[in-house]
Structures are given as C-alpha cells and as structure tokens.
Image: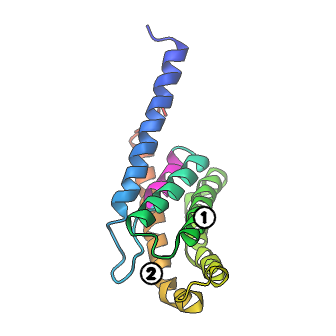
Amino acid sequence: MKTQTDLKQNIETGKLVYIAMLIALSFVGAFINIPGTSIALDSMPGFFAALFLGPGVGAVVAALGHLITAAYRGFYLTLPLHIIIGILMAFSAYMFGWIYQRTYGVIASIIAIILNGPVSLLIIVLSSFLIGIENGGWVLFTTLITPLTLAATVNVFLAYGVFKAFKRNKIGDKI
C-alpha cells in the first residue's frame, strides 16, 4: 500500500519527467522554422507547460527551450541578446498561464501572442541598440515583425489546442 509520501514522490517525479520532455520538445521545435527566418516552433512546449504544469514551470521551459535553441544555432544575435530573449520568452509563457488561470483561453492566447510577438520584438530592438548589434534596430523589427507574430500565433494556439485535448482526455490528471 502506497503512503502519502510515496504518492507525492511519484507526482513530483512525473512532473520532472514532463518538464524534461517539454524542454527536449523545445529543442525539436527549433528544427521547424518559419521559412526564410531563424524563427522556429521552439516555444510551443513552454506555452503548453504554462497551462499544464503552471505559469512558473512554463516560464522555465520557455526560457531554457530558447537558450538551447540559440546555443544550437551559435547565439547568432549574441549571447546577451539571447538571454534577454529567453527572459522575454519566460515572461510571455508565465503571463499566458497566469492570465489563463484568471480568464478565458482565447483572451490569454491573444495577450500571449501580443507579448511574444510585437512587444518582445520591440524590446529586442531597443536592446539591440544598447548592445550595438550592427543589423539590429528597426531593420530587425521590420524584417521580423510578420514572421515572429506568425510564429507566436502558431506556438500559442498549438499549445492551447494540445492542452485542451489533454484536459478533455484527462491526461496528466495526477500531476
């Protein structure tokens, strides 16, 4: 017979397994690019984690997922800028989960897309000015606004759709 402690340990172990799998899926998503850009579907697992495991876990998965992807690609926008992007990814995923818990999924999704797309890109552009990236600034903004917003939309709605399917099928109820 399992004790309360054994059950709690199993739940924590299960949660760690989900977190590890979602971080690994972020890396896999790095290989699925928006054509003509380096923007990928690596943030979907972070957004999903924010709904499935909580906003804090989603933030960690999103940040680590981005940093692993950026490392794989050689930190092409410089390490400092990728750290900023990782923080922005974490914030976007956290807010997605937090807003979802307090409102409706569609509202949380729209806000997450705005935060992860145009708002994050604006902060990245301002940061690129401060860091002195040669191809940064407004050229970066005009080049990436459409594909980044598209990628944010795809990542957020895929995460929301998968979460709804998990919820409907009661997958992970013990986590």
Which of discs 1 and 2 lies nearer the camera? The answer is 2
Percent x, y of residue 174: 47, 31
In the picture, residue 130 is in which quadrant?
A: bottom right
Q: Which residue is mark 1?
A: 107
Q: Nearer the viewer, residue 84 or 120?
A: 84
The answer to whether residue 33 is above or below residue 145 is above
Question: Which residues, given as a range, are shown in magenta?
Answer: 44-52
Q: Nearer the viewer, residue 11 or 23?
A: 23
Q: Nearer the viewer, residue 134 or 16?
A: 134
Q: Secondary structure at mark 2?
A: helix
Q: Secondary structure at mark 1?
A: helix
Pointer 2: residues within 10 angstroms few (<14), some, or many (20+)? Answer: many
Q: At 45% from the left edge and 77% from the top edge, which residue is drawn?
A: 150
Count of number-bearing discs:
2
In this rendering, does residue 158 appear at all?
yes
Q: Which residue is mark 2?
A: 147
Quarter that holds the N terminus: top left
Q: Do callouts 1 and 2 mark residues in contact (Cβ within 8 Å)? A: no
In this rendering, does residue 172 appear at all?
no
- Quick check: 132 left or right of 64? right
Colour style of the rendered protein structure: rainbow
The amino acid on which the numbered mark 1 sits, given as a three-letter code, is Ile
Percent x, y of residue 68: 44, 59
Q: Is residue 49 magenta?
A: yes
The amino acid on which the numbered mark 2 sits, given as a three-letter code, is Pro
- Quick check: 129 left or right of 21? right
